[in-house]
Image: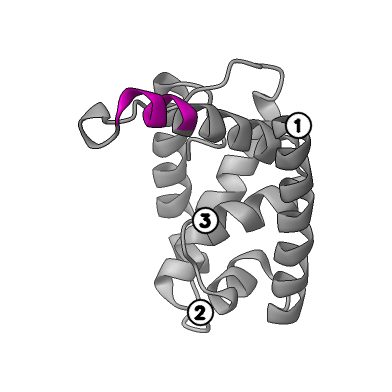
Amino acid sequence: MKFYCRNKSDREDLAQEIIYQLLKSYHSFSDEYRFSTWMYRVALNVAISFYRKNKSKKVFYLEDINSDHHDESASSELEDNLTILEKYLDELKELDKALMILYLESKSYKEISEILGISETNVATKISRVKEVLKQKFSKNIN
């Protein structure tokens, strides 16, 4: 959710809206898909709508990194890389952004295809292309 929200207050609002929409649309749940897939699809649609409404806000939010597990320089570098990744993800088209968020959450290609309503082959192709774009952006940022 943090990729669709800028701050804690927005995330809380989005979470409430997702719960409301899940309850409101429960009658549309079909046994054709797993419950978690249906839930993800509803949540993703609500998050995208929320993001569109709040797109003009340009303040990026990055959750605190637990410094007990990293030394200061590694933590700083990780924080910088996460901030850059968030910026690049934010620049993606909505479908690509949703796709990469699901990918980063370790969803299988099958789950992603069911949630987004595209074929597994299309998922694999899009992920490969977006990863290449992100890799190029990161390499330009380093140089």
Residue 126, given in percent of the width and then of the height, sits at 76, 65
Q: Name the amino acid, label 2.
A: Tyr
On the question of residue 129 being in view, the answer is: yes
Residue designated by label 1: 143
Residue designated by label 3: 104
**The C terminus lies in which quarter of the figure?**
top right
In the image, the segment drawn in magenta is: 71-77
Q: How is the image coloured?
A: one colour
Q: Is residue 75 magenta?
A: yes
Asked which secondary structure carries label 3, the reply is helix
Residue designated by label 2: 33
Residue 9, given in percent of the width and then of the height, sits at 41, 20
Mark 2 or mark 3, earlier in chain: 2
Q: Are marks 2 and 1 in contact (CB under 8 Å)?
A: no
Residue 136, given in percent of the width and then of the height, sits at 78, 46
Asked which secondary structure carries label 2, the reply is loop
Report crowding for label 1: few under 14, some 14 to 19, many 20 or more residues within 10 A (C-alpha).
Answer: few
Q: Quadrant of residue 131?
A: bottom right
Q: Residue at x 44, y 61 (%)?
A: 26
Q: How many marks?
A: 3
Q: Residue at x 52, y 67 (%)?
A: 28
Q: Residue furthest left?
A: 68
